[in-house]
Amino acid sequence: MGSSELLIVLDRDGGPPLQQQVCDQVTVLVRSGQLRPGDALPASRELAQQLDVSRTVITRAYELLRAHGILTARRGSGTRVAGPAGSTARPRSPGAPTVLAPQPPRATDSGNALWQPWEPPPAQYPGGALDFRHGTPALAEFPVARWRQSLHDAYGRADNATLGYGPAEGSSALRTEVAALVRRSRALDASPDRIMVTGGATQALDILVRMLVGPGDVVVIEDPSHTVLRQVFGCSEAAVVPVPVDEEGLRVADIDACVRARGHAPERVKLVYVTPSHQFPTGFIMSEARRRGLLEWAYAHGATVLEDDYHNEFTFTDERLPALAAERHRDTVVYVGSFSKTLFPALRIGYAVLPPHLVRPFLGIKWITDRLTPTVGQEALADFIRTGAYARHISRMTRLYRQRRRRLLEALYEHFGAEVRVSGEAAGLHVLVTFTGARGVQEERIASLAAERGVRIYPASGYFVQNLPAEPTFLMGYAALPAPRITEGVALLASAVGEAKRQAPAP
């Protein structure tokens, strides 16, 4: 494919913003192999003429694509597809065969802004890099020796049932411990027979989508939201409708209008996905009024609320609201949790707490997809919880994360003062940081200058479907960085922001 043409078709009748559509379709071309590292893209003016849109649309789309590492731009060489991290990409030779990557399930998804993966993949950076990546717990602090003892004990007790094909719903011992855990920490009273063990929270989301929605149905998600769930929901047969979030959480009163604006009836909404305890990525906590409103809306419309409590154990305020599923929801809420952030991601054990009428359908799909989540790991986790090792680890990590969070906030305000806005500091393992004093500066420019100083930060714009941040905004995780490294990293980041502001053209 030459630089003079891109196979982009825009939906001008109620679709996502045009700049987002351009971003999404260029991303598809790159990920499918139709554009490869080093390929040149048309100049912004040329592509704007080709698509009959303003040049601003293309310029903004290219900025977003550069911010997320999909494109690069250098003086004299134009805009090109980026190469792998740390490599120097070369244009492919004319006539080189195109190897297509696996495609999404439906051809019509290729222009859908909702399913595209904006999440930067894990990468290897030079030793000593200060990485503020979100979602990574303090793995160096995990009690490996104690976990090894639980594994040893689990294998020591192993019998034919443990080593063979166990129940699809998961280990009875683990489900009992999870029931006690969510009762203590989230005020959620559920019997073990309503708890299904899964291969991480993502499998629970996937099964629920398969079970609850079909062609013509609607899934409501928060905007902004996590890219993984956009992939899971966007590859279903349902229409995915983003609804804005504010300081009180999902704007429940806007659901009907947003669904109708996309050409659907609110009665076709079958699933509403929320992160009420620490909205991703803003960190806002859903207010009690919004919680009540959402439960009433879901019951009136026959919809299921999917509560993803991804940071369920880590809260830094004295007052803590219970899980949404702990409310009187009349069987409208499914609660999904995971041990990836509380223990370690490689464990790949999550769970869903289901209303009684969803248990058998959920089990039927899980049995077909994987038969069982590995049993020995479940038995080891049950032992880890039962013996108090889990509670001790959570208590220790909460104190550690509180210290690291405080150091990050102090450092940000020390260096940026009134020119920074932070949200999400009440819970979780990351905060959303907006540099209000750098309005007009490109996120990708700040990220690039920070990387030159050995600091990795992650632009937030890709998590938004609509209403992108007006100022450069970043997701900053702090759990894996010791306090002195956080201090060093923020100082270097301040230097990068300052240089980016000096280099920015005058308004």
Image (tube, rainbow, N blue to C red):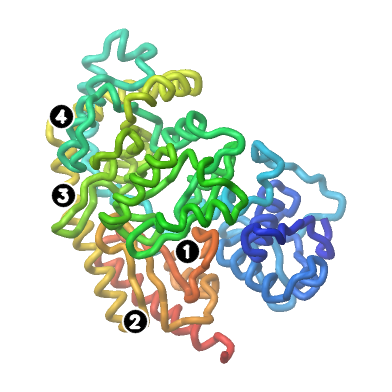
Tell me which label, 1 or 3, sits earlier in the chain: 3
Where's residue 366, x and y in %? 45, 23
Q: Nearer the viewer, mark 3 or mark 4?
A: 4
Q: Nearer the viewer, mark 2 or mark 1?
A: 1
Query: What's the distance in space between the residues labelled 2 and 3, CA to CA?
Result: 30 Å
Q: Is residue 90 visible?
A: no
Do the CB atoms of the residues marked 4 and 2 lie less than 8 Å apart?
no
Q: Is residue 356 visible?
A: yes
Using a 10 Å C-alpha cutoff, classify the residue at mark 1 as few (fewer than 14 neighbours), some (14 to 19) or many (20 or more).
many
Query: What's the distance in space between the residues labelled 4 and 1, CA to CA?
Result: 39 Å
Q: Which residue is mark 4?
A: 386
Q: Nearer the viewer, mark 2 or mark 3?
A: 2
Q: Nearer the viewer, mark 4 or mark 1?
A: 1
Tell me which label, 2 or 1, sits earlier in the chain: 2
Query: What's the distance in space between the residues labelled 4 and 2, CA to CA?
Result: 45 Å
- Residue at left offset 81%, top offset 72%: 49
Do the CB atoms of the residues marked 1 and 3 lie less than 8 Å apart?
no
Do the CB atoms of the residues marked 4 and 1 lie less than 8 Å apart?
no
Q: Which mark is residue 416?
A: 2
Q: Quadrant of residue 340?
A: top left
Q: Quadrant of residue 118?
A: bottom right
The amino acid on which the numbered mark 3 sits, given as a three-letter code, is Arg
Where's residue 274, x and y in %? 39, 48
* Helix, strand or loop at mark 2: helix
Q: Which residue is mark 3?
A: 396
Tell me which label, 4 or 1, sits earlier in the chain: 4
